[in-house]
Image (cartoon, helix red, strand yellow):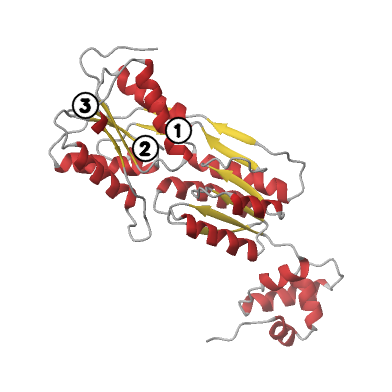
């Protein structure tokens, strides 16, 4: 293993003391001759010196690292959120430690403990665990937390939420507006507040327009596991569509809990020779980048994922930088993005 370059190596080559090297490389205000300062920086560059951030943090008790925990890096929705977080963190001089919980509450709790032990200055989390006691306890011990996507009831910290119920209502109403009355619903387990709210929005729209659907048209997965299945959501869409197509009376439209699952739905419909939207309309949820790249492009409900990441990071860093910030609860609003996977049936009318 190649020897790590230290300030002692730099001091030896620059012909000065380690104390002077340390002052220059840590941007200390201690006066050092400009020519010596430039020589030290040049030597450090030539030797490819990388500062020991852990040692520096132990001395200053001031970490410039934040932790981020997301349920799934394979879903581009979360990837876009992380990109927004990283863009803001980098612009403000912070580093990001990313943890992927693989939809496992046990792994999420493990990461929470690890990040706290590593003394990250703050945490941005989309929690899928039903037990919120650990994150609440860490917040009480001084860990700055910003929650996004999934609500953490009782947490005394800022949260960025999304009006999932309204999004579910808009998606279902869009199909009703196109004269669909046989509207199926496909989703991963309703174990998260977000999915449950989407489902409630679906039911709310059906009730408003007095539409009854067959029980077998509502297909909810019984399990959720990603550690051994990297394409869980896509495969889930395929499996639930297979079950749906076994119904004697088929729906004319399918509302899917997220875009990745909708891609699996469309894949299985194509495999079964069912054309979208000519024979079956499909609408997703999230508006990830791939949704407009599909053939046909997916009609979906937009969540401002990248902006959500930027907003969450700015809220957290404002707290860490000592700005006067109170607990903030932000609820972002959905928007229907109509593309080419939903078709108007005979008798379609404008409801609004």
Q: Which residue is mark 1?
A: 197
- Residue 264 percent coordinates (x, y): 27, 44
Say whether residue 100 is visible: no
- Residue 220 percent coordinates (x, y): 32, 40
Dots 2, 1 in contact, CB < 8 A: no
Secondary structure beneath label 1: helix
Residue drawn at 46 percent across, 29 percent down: 165
Front position in the image: 320 or 71: 71
Dots 1, 3 in contact, CB < 8 A: no
Identify the mark nearer the N-term, 1 or 3. 1
- Residue 313 percent coordinates (x, y): 61, 47
Q: Is residue 62 above or below residue 351?
A: below
Front position in the image: 173 or 29: 173
Q: Residues within 10 Å of mark 3 (few under 14, many from 20)?
A: many
Identify the mark nearer the N-term, 3 or 2. 3
In whole angstroms, how far apart are the C-alphas of marks 2 and 1? 10 Å
Q: Is residue 259 above or below residue 170?
A: below
In whole angstroms, how far apart are the C-alphas of marks 3 and 2? 17 Å
Front position in the image: 173 or 109: 109
Residue 252's disc number = 3
Secondary structure beneath label 3: loop
In whole angstroms, how far apart are the C-alphas of marks 1 and 3? 23 Å
Identify the mark nearer the N-term, 2 or 1. 1
Q: Is residue 307 left or right of residue 341?
A: right
Count how many numbered circles sit on residues in the image: 3
Q: Which residue is mark 2?
A: 257
């Amino acid at each position: 293993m190649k020897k790590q370059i230290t300030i002692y190596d730099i001091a030896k080559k620059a012909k000065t003391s380690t104390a002077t090297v340390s002052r220059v490389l840590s941007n200390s205000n201690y006066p050092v001759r400009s020519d010596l300062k430039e020589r030290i920086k040049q030597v450090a560059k030539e030797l490819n010196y990388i500062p020991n951030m852990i040692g520096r943090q132990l001395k200053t008790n001031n970490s410039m690292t934040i932790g981020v925990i997301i349920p799934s890096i394979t879903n581009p929705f979360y990837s876009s959120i992380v990109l927004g977080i990283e863009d803001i963190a980098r612009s403000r001089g912070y580093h990001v430690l990313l943890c992927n919980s693989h939809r496992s509450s046990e792994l999420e709790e493990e990461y929470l403990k690890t990040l706290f032990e590593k003394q990250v200055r703050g945490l941005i989390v989309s929690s899928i665990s039903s037990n919120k006691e650990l994150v609440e306890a860490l917040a009480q011990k001084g860990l700055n937390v910003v929650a996004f996507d999934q609500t953490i009831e009782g947490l005394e910290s800022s949260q960025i939420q999304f009006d999932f119920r309204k999004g579910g209502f808009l998606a279902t109403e869009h199909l009703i507006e196109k004269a669909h009355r046989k509207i199926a619903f496909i989703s991963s387990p309703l174990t998260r507040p977000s999915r449950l709210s989407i489902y409630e929005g679906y039911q709310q729209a059906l009730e408003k327009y007095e539409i009854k659907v067959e029980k077998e048209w509502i297909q909810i997965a019984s399990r959720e596991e990603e550690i051994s299945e990297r394409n869980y959501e896509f495969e889930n869409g395929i499996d639930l569509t297979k079950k749906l197509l076994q119904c004697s009376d088929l729906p004319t439209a399918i509302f899917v809990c997220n875009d990745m699952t909708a891609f699996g739905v469309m894949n299985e419909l194509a495999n079964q020779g069912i054309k979208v939207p000519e024979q079956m309309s499909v609408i997703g949820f999230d508006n990830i980048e791939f949704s407009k790249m599909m053939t046909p492009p997916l009609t979906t409900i937009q969540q401002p994922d990248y902006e959500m990441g930027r907003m969450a990071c700015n809220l957290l860093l404002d707290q860490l930088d000592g700005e006067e910030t109170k607990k903030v609860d932000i609820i972002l609003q959905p928007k229907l993005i109509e593309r080419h996977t939903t078709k108007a049936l005979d008798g379609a009318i404008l409801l609004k």
